[in-house]
Image: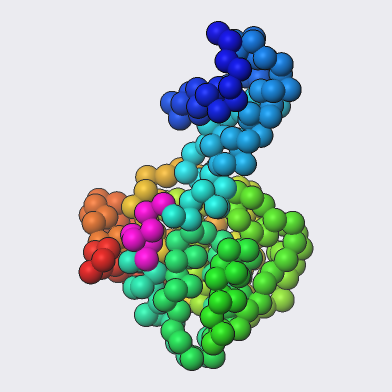
């Protein structure tokens, strides 16, 4: 099969990745009758769009957890806003808040109370940018090497900065939530960073989309009992949250999106 038009070729590759298939650069080059360099350019372009994860010799499909932050921002936005609106009601005047990197916590920036002398600490570039547009908020950005999947800094520099803080309320980002294993993360460095933040936090809040309760991530962040308030979607199935209720101090449902 000879395919000279890169856009058409990338559409075929994108479809295969969307079906959960991995792709090999050498095999694609032979199939399309082009050089491996051309295929590598295709894969770099698709990775930049969040459509694949580059590996040696080819690419792998992305899951919801391994998509880069920018690819997740607008997905299910009304549902994220409903969670954010409910979670923002827990904030008290004068608090130091930590907004963990994540698209749901990004939505929270629109609902932070006004004129309450809040200090927002974050490791997320997108969250920091959103907070900067709020002149009533103060911002402390934790630096370090940026991880594109996380959308923020989770390296040793960020961990060391976190240990020097005192956080009143942490809005924890999670990749999965399980009654037995608690809050989990896909990336080891992200889990280490989250644990460092929780060590200096008085109150932990988690905003949980429905899919978090069936997602599996390998790195444990904290037990459910350490999440003081868990805000869930209005239509989360009861069997997803019933196993958590004996451990989590408070689980509340958000309003229906748009209500």
- Residue 162, image x, y percentages: 68, 70
Q: Is residue 95 left or right of residue 211?
A: right
Q: Nearer the viewer, residue 101 or 40?
A: 40
Residue 183 among those drawn in magenta? no
Q: Residue at x 64, y 10 (%)?
A: 33
Q: Nearer the viewer, residue 116 or 170?
A: 116
The quadrant of the picture occupied by the C terminus is: bottom left
Above or below, 76 against 88 in this view is above
Q: Residue at x 55, y 71 (%)?
A: 130
Residue 39 in view here: yes
The quadrant of the picture occupied by the N terminus is: top right
Q: Is residue 216 left or right of residue 163?
A: left
Residue 21 in view here: no
- Residue 244, image x, y percentages: 34, 58
Task: Say which quarter of the image contains residue 28.
Answer: top right
**Magenta segment:** 75-81
Q: Residue at x 63, y 79 (%)?
A: 139
Above or below, 46 against 161 in this view is above
Above or below, 85 against 33 in this view is below
Q: Farthest residue in the front direction?
A: 5
């Amino acid at each position: 099969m000879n395919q000279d038009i890169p856009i058409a070729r990338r559409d075929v590759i994108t479809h295969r990745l969307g079906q959960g298939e991995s792709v090999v650069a050498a095999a694609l080059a032979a199939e399309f009758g082009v050089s491996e360099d051309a295929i590598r350019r295709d894969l770099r372009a698709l990775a930049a769009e969040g459509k694949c994860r580059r590996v040696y010799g080819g690419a792998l499909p992305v899951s919801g957890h391994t998509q880069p932050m920018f690819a997740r921002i607008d997905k299910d936005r009304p549902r994220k806003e409903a969670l954010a609106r409910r979670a923002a009601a827990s904030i008290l005047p004068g608090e130091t808040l930590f907004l963990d990197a994540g698209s749901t916590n990004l939505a929270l920036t629109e609902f932070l109370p006004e004129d309450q002398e809040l200090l927002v600490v974050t490791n997320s570039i997108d969250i920091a940018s959103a907070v900067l547009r709020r002149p009533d908020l103060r911002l402390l950005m934790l630096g370090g090497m940026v991880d594109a999947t996380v959308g923020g800094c989770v390296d040793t520099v960020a961990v060391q900065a976190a240990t020097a803080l005192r956080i009143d309320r942490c809005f924890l980002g999670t990749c999965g939530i399980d009654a037995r294993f608690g809050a989990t993360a896909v990336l080891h460095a992200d889990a280490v960073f989250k644990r460092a933040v929780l060590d200096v936090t008085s109150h932990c809040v988690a905003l949980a989309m429905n899919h978090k309760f069936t997602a599996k991530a390998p790195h444990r962040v904290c037990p459910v009992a350490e999440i003081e308030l868990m805000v869930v979607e209005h239509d989360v199935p009861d069997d997803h949250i019933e196993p958590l209720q004996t451990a989590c101090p408070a689980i509340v449902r958000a309003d229906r999106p748009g209500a």
